[in-house]
Each structure stands twice: as C-alpha cells, then as structure tokens.
Image: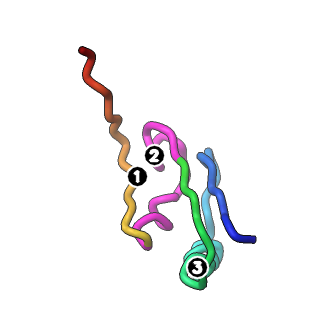
C-alpha cells in the first residue's frame, strides 16, 4: 500500500491503535489523504482531528466561500 485514503468518515471513530498505525504508516514513507466535509469532526461525528494534527492539519467546523464578482 502506497496511499491510505480516509474519505469523509461519518459516524466512525478511529481507535488509539488505529491512529498510531496510521501515523506510523506515514512516518515510514506511506502517503495519506484526509477528506472531510463541512462541519468536520463535530458534524460528521468522527475523529479525523485526532490524526490530522500529527501532520500540521486541523479540520474546523466552518466553511470558506468564494466572493462573487
């Protein structure tokens, strides 16, 4: 496996062991793609933010919109 994709988990929490394994996978050369929808962990009822900060990322429950011309 070269890439692990965690694509918008909903109502699904990663255990401490799974988080440790994911972090170790990346630190030993694996690639990780984290995907979340608006609302992040709070609305999706998951814990990607227990994984993401290990790589300098934080999912927030706000949204960014582009200004209209």
What percent of the width, then of the height, locates residue 7?
A: 63, 49
Q: Label 1, label 3: how many angstroms apart (C-alpha)?
A: 19 Å
Give the extent of the magenta segment.
36-54
Label for residue 59? Answer: 1
Query: Residue sitting at 45 percent across and 37 percent down?
Result: 38
Q: What residue is shown with label 2?
A: 40
Q: Is residue 66 left or right of residue 42?
A: left
What percent of the width, then of the height, locates residue 59?
A: 40, 52
Mark 2 / mark 1, whichever is N-terminal:
2
Whether label 1 touches label 3, CB < 8 Å: no
Question: Is label 2 in a helix, a strand or a loop?
Answer: helix
Circle count: 3
Give neighbour class at mark 2: few <14, some 14-19, many 20+ (Cα, 10 Å): many
Asked which quadrant contains residue 22, the reply is bottom right
Label for residue 43? Answer: none
Query: Residue sitting at 30 percent across and 27 percent down?
Result: 66
Give neighbour class at mark 3: few <14, some 14-19, many 20+ (Cα, 10 Å): few
Q: Label 2, label 1: how many angstroms apart (C-alpha)?
A: 6 Å
What percent of the width, then of the height, locates residue 10?
A: 61, 45
What percent of the width, then of the height, locates residue 5?
A: 65, 57
Question: Is label 1 in a helix, a strand or a loop?
Answer: loop
Mark 2 / mark 3, whichever is N-terminal:
3
Label for residue 20? Answer: 3
Whether label 2 touches label 1, CB < 8 Å: yes
Q: Quadrant of the C terminus?
A: top left
Q: Residue furthest bottom?
A: 28
């Amino acid at each position: 496996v070269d890439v692990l994709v965690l694509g918008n988990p909903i109502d699904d929490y990663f255990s401490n062991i799974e988080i440790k394994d994911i972090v170790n996978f990346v630190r030993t050369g694996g690639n990780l793609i984290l995907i979340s929808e608006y609302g992040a962990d709070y609305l999706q009822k998951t814990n990607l933010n227990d994984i993401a900060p290990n790589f300098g990322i934080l999912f927030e429950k706000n949204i960014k919109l582009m200004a209209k011309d």
